[in-house]
Image (cartoon, grey):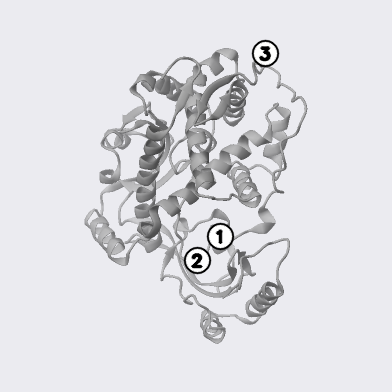
Amino acid sequence: MMLRLISLPALAFCALLLGAAGPAPTGRTATAPGAPATPAGRGMEIVAVVNGDAVTNADVTARGKLFAISTGIPITPELLDRLRPQITQQLIDERLRLQEVLRRHVIVGERKIAAAIREIEQRNNMPPDALRTRLAADGVNLRTLVDQIRVQIGWTEVLRLHLGTSAVISEAEISEQARLTAQQAGKPEYRLGEIFIPVDNPARTADAQRFADAVIGQLRSGAAFPVVAAQFSQSQTALQGGDLGWLPINQLDPEIAAIVPEMPPGAISNPIKVAGGFSIVQMRGKREIGRESGIALTLRQVFLPFSSPLKPDAPTEQQRTTLEKARQIGASVHSCEQMEQAQKANNSPRPADPGGEVSLASVNPPQFRQLLATIPVARASQPLISNDGVTVVIVCSREQKVLAQLPKEEIQNRLLNERVELASRQLQRDLRRRATIDLRDGQV
């Protein structure tokens, strides 16, 4: 997923995961009513070759159907023709990213893919397995979505490797950003959603704008912005539904900054030409810096590490023992002071206080945010299992208040997201420059 930092360890909410996506079914797939049929023999027609890997007409058609499902519109041959050039370019970029994932020996497990699918379902208020069922009913192989998610997750790991130590935000950087933000107190900031459509070749600008216009038409007709962003945005925020978080005007692209002050909540922009492509922006909220109200938390935790990475289907004896110890801590601790004592008694490698006061809105993943919002104060949580250990947390205080300063976690996320996005676009350009790409429609 996106490189978001949180004070507490990333949690694996295993009970919420879908079953791992199985291999693509064989045999003929039914065509959804009203969907354009692929003429016999055309499905495997090659539309592009990327460093020796083929993109076929069937790939383009399947992604077009996925777009139709995500926007809730009937896909027609005319609409697919409008989308085809940009979908082809997107698939080419995905091939380049996948090749880099494989070159760096990055493995994306089926459980991560299943978790991402489940997150999409939760974001759209769908019960488990509903997305799988919907795709099958509309004649779209689940593998189309799985392949897309695999590239998105794998690319994030590539960026981690690419950035190395520069992915760590220093305390000095956080302090400087906090100082600059404090100087902006009282000025507006905006919570935006973004769909970024790249233009790497000026000859493709018109195709990209036509694609953006088609997307905007469906968004304004009621298509869910997070779903469309997850499908088609080439920004690293795609897996978060395009959410850019809260940003002051001086941290926006100048072209976007010139438009957003006049946008009412919920509005969708026209295509905005920015460096490297087009942005489609959704206004999700406005507030004044340093005067926003929110829920502030203080927490304590005990983290018990595993001696080896967890394999959920085959936990080791040490992992079973660690989980049982975590359960005992959760049952015996009834205050934050007791949690601090438990942290010391168990020589936990992580501090009992994960970072001072925390803004609930800045906590990720969403399941953890929901837990912190609902668990009674001074009651320990159930053990929270991650790949590297088990955590028990307790909420010491939870109150609505004016948040005069940005939480440390939000500043970390903001700085890191900027760094990751820049690295992503630079690396994608480098891959394109070095690639051998043969477009069979004769265009370069």
Q: Is residue 424 visible?
A: yes
- Distance Cα–Cα, label 3 vs label 2: 52 Å
Mark in front: 3 vs 2: 3
53 vs 290, nearest the viewer: 53
Location of residue 280 by image quarter:
top left
Quarter of the image with the C terminus in it: top left
N-term-proximal mark, 3 vs 1:
3
- Distance Cα–Cα, label 2 vs label 1: 10 Å
Which residue carries the number 1 mark?
368
* SS for dot 3: loop
Residue visible at 35% across and 61% down?
A: 169
Q: Which amino acid does label 3 sit on?
A: Pro
- Distance Cα–Cα, label 3 vs label 1: 47 Å
Mark in front: 2 vs 1: 2
26 vs 33: above or below: below
Q: What residue type is labelled 2?
A: Leu
234 vs 392: above or below: above
Which residue carries the number 2 mark?
8
162 vs 397: above or below: above
185 vs 314, nearest the viewer: 314
Across and down, in percent, residue 397 comes to 48, 71
312 vs 21: above or below: below
Across and down, in percent, residue 367 comes to 58, 56
Question: Can you name the residue that lies furthest to the right here?
Answer: 27
Mark in front: 3 vs 1: 3
Q: Do the residues labelled 2 and 1 touch (CB within 8 Å)?
A: yes
Residue visible at 50% across and 56% down?
A: 364
Location of residue 277 by image quarter:
top left
Location of residue 285 by image quarter:
top left
Which residue carries the number 3 mark?
39
* SS for dot 1: helix
